[in-house]
Amino acid sequence: MANERVHRTAHETEIDAPAEAVYELVADTSRWPLYFPPNVHVEQLERTGDTERLRMWATAGGRVKSWTSRRVLDPAALRVDFRQEVSAAPVESMGGSWIAEDLGGGRSRLTLLHDFTVVGDRAEDVEWVERVTDANSRAELENLRTLAARRHALPELVLDFEDSVHVDGPAEAVYAFLHHVEDWPERVAHVDRLDLTEDGTGVQVMAMDTRTADGSVHTTESVRVCFPDDLRIVYKQTATPALMSAHTGRWTVVPAEGGGVTATSRHSVVLRAEAVEKILGEGADVARARTYVREALGRNSTATLNLAKQFAESPVPAL
């Protein structure tokens, strides 16, 4: 690293919200996949006081990257410092800070700083890291600006729910059905088309056409991170239907009391309030949109779970 140069970037935005509210959004990474466009999934590896270690997956320049970071939270200074412990090539090292500052009158400034080095300091690699850091930083700050300004409406716009089925069959067979999405167009009635790429690290990138109860077809794009050791798949839609500004979810398979397993589909959604009447008709409100999304997503995921149940309970599951 002796010949590598440290590169630095700075991005900032002013927000119609108090600095404390902005800091809280930055500090709570459990919602980052839902609130931050580039972020796919976050796993908290450990937490001691105001220090935490995280494994993160995010899109960067059309690719999916994963790394491990350590963060130090300072709620008094409204600041979060981060440093990657294990970076994704071509990044050799990266760190930075989130800093929220009070501007008075219920307004604040949020600054995002990065410093990084690149393996070999090759000009084309430096340019790529600068470009994706700029794009992701702008997307994150813009979404934070919008979310913080609408923070009082978030409880109404954010929807979390899950559906489960009991399966009297092997957990591995249930997971296999959920994992092998390339077979879904033949196995799942509401899936018309599915294109899949995998990179060998448990990351799947897919584009899918699904049909709703009214016959309309929605095209979505998703990134899935698969954890075969604990029979879990998490995902984020990177292209959502018009009624949702964000959609994340997970499939889990766990032992059930009394035998068998419980297969669960969980969804988290941020509704796009300005699209409600356009999609659902004049006079429709967010409450109706919540019901519509809950029923549509729940219907499809429950149908998929029941097919996984049928598959796992068959005499010889075709793994």
Image (cartoon, grey):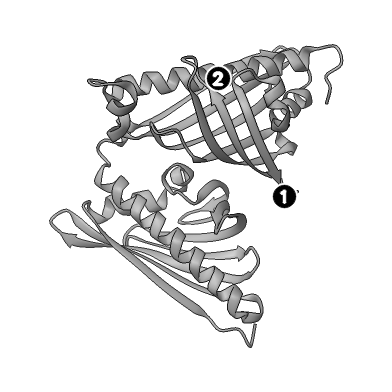
**Residue 27 seen in this snapshot:** yes
Give the x, y percent position of residue 176: 76, 28
Relative to 310, does residue 62 appear above or below in the rendering? below
Name the residue at 68% across, 16% down. 307
> Under tag 1, what secondary structure?
loop
Q: Residues within 10 Å of mark 1 (few under 14, many from 20)?
A: few
Q: Label 1 amino acid? A: Asp
Relative to 28, does residue 114 appear above or below in the rendering? below
Q: How many marks?
A: 2
Give the x, y percent position of residue 187: 71, 20
Instruction: Identify the residue position indicated by label 2 in the image.
Output: 300
Relative to 48, does residue 204 appear above or below in the rendering? above
Give the x, y percent position of residue 237: 52, 39
Q: Earlier in the sequence, mark 2 or mark 1?
A: 1
For the C terminus, the image quarter is top right
Q: Would residue 231 appear left or right of 79 to someone viewing this image?
A: right
| Rendered image quadrant of residue 154 | top left
Task: Identify the residue at the far right of this view.
Answer: 316
**Residue 82 seen in this snapshot:** no
| Rendered image quadrant of residue 73 | bottom left
For the N terminus, the image quarter is bottom right
Question: Mark 2 to mark 1: distance in Å?
Answer: 27 Å
> Under tag 2, what secondary structure?
helix
Q: Label 2 amino acid? A: Asn
Q: Residues within 10 Å of mark 2 (few under 14, many from 20)?
A: some
Name the residue at 24% across, 21% down. 282
Q: Would residue 179 appear left or right of 148 to someone viewing this image?
A: right
Task: Identify the residue at the far left of this view.
Answer: 105
Name the residue at 62% across, 55% down. 66
Name the residue at 56% across, 75% down. 126
Instruction: Identify the residue position indicated by label 1 in the image.
Output: 199
Give the x, y percent position of residue 268: 46, 32
